[in-house]
Image: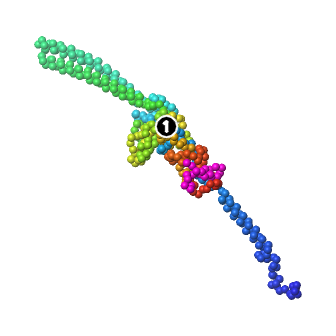
Amino acid sequence: MNPEGRSETGLERLRIPEERRGGTGRGGGRLWAILLGAGGLLVLALVLRWALKPVEVPVARVLEPAGPEGQAILEASGYVTPRRRATVAAKITGRVAEMLVEEGMRVEAGQVLARLDEAEARRRLEAAEAEVRVARARLPEARAGLALADAQFQRVSALHHSGYASDDDRDRARTAYDAARSQVAAAEESLKAAEAAREVARQDLENCTIRAPFAGIAVSKDAQVGEMVSPVSAGGGFTRTGIATVVDMDSLEVEVDVNESFIARIHPGQRVEAALDAYPDWKIPASVRTVIPTADRQKATVKVRISFDRLDPRILPDMGVKVAFLGEAPPPGTPKPAALLPREAVFNREGKPSVFVLEGGRLRLREVRPGEARGMDLEVLSGCTPGETVVVGGQDHLKDGMRARPRR
């Protein structure tokens, strides 16, 4: 029975009371409001996190400008090369019997580097010396025959003059004398030939000893004991053509190729600043030694050789090196640059040359006063100091005060 005294049907008993309906009651609306508020706070947190995340930017260090000796007017790359470098080889073909050199060894001029098997050369020398002794022994015999023929010719000539010898006797005596004289000349020439052959054999024996042509450092050992060496390539790759490579470390210099369009800026004696790829922060003073008077038509370049003012053990052959050719010293009264930075660090913001400096994790916009260009760098007369960090790309999307960090 219901409160009104009517009996309830089965369907009415299944009806959900109004206060238990979640979608239309006051409690259900409050739950939806809480969920929407939490979602909004989450979205706001994500937006703020994205907005406050530091932007990564490419940076470069502001450098100290060059001294009063001048500024870079041209840059080039090349390699350290020695003026004197020799791959020492044997003058004859032979088997290596002894190696006396190792990589990195300091050698002096004339020092023995290796010895070849000299057994055959020594036997040839002994045979040549025997030939000299034989030729030398034949010479007195020939001279004695000449003396006898000369005496006989003198007697026959005297008898012929007195009428006791015929013309035929005199002619035979003269012929014998001439033949004896020829035998003496032949014996003398045979002795000279034997002595010359002995010197050749002696030189062959001396060629079995390989010596350093000049003082320097052995940078490679190209043969081993037991290998065959020859002055020419032979044997299908099984014959060595060199014993060792010696470099005169006192003759190291830089060799660079300069575009022929800029070769007019280079002259002998010009000051140069070199930096090895292995030690990029080490500036090495140097000067132009010579400009090779020929051009490479394929590369349109001219070869320039540069001498170091002072050598250092860290400078090694075939090292990569970058050089900056310096101009003449600026005239008196020229403003002195305050810093040197890459060209791409300077951009125009509202018509004014500016840079972005990274300080304390934030970008600071600064106006600068640019100076002369130095290759890929630019002088700055004011606005930056050496040691600061500047942005070198993408400045159009950056703002003053923005959080940033260097790009890794």
- Tell which of 320 and 376 is nearer to you: 376
Percent position (x, y) of residue 335?
A: 53, 43
**Pick the front one: 392 or 36:** 392
Q: Is residue 151 left or right of residue 95?
A: left
- The foreground one among 246 and 300 is 300
**Residue type for callout 1:** Ala
Is 25 left, or right, of 141 in this rendering? right
* Image position, residue 299 (x, y; %): 42, 48
Specify start and end residues of the magenta stretch as a single range.
349-369
Tell whether position 362 is magenta. Answer: yes
Asked if residue 95 is positioned above or below residue 139 in the image, the reply reads: below
Residue positioned 40% across, 40% down in the render: 292
Percent position (x, y) of residue 121?
40, 29
Q: Let me know if residue 222 appears in the view.
A: no
In this image, 380 relative to 194: left or right?
A: right
Q: Residue at x 49, y 43 (%)?
A: 72
Secondary structure state at the residue bearing disc 1:
strand
Q: Which sits in the foreground, 115 or 269?
A: 269
What residue is shown with label 1?
286
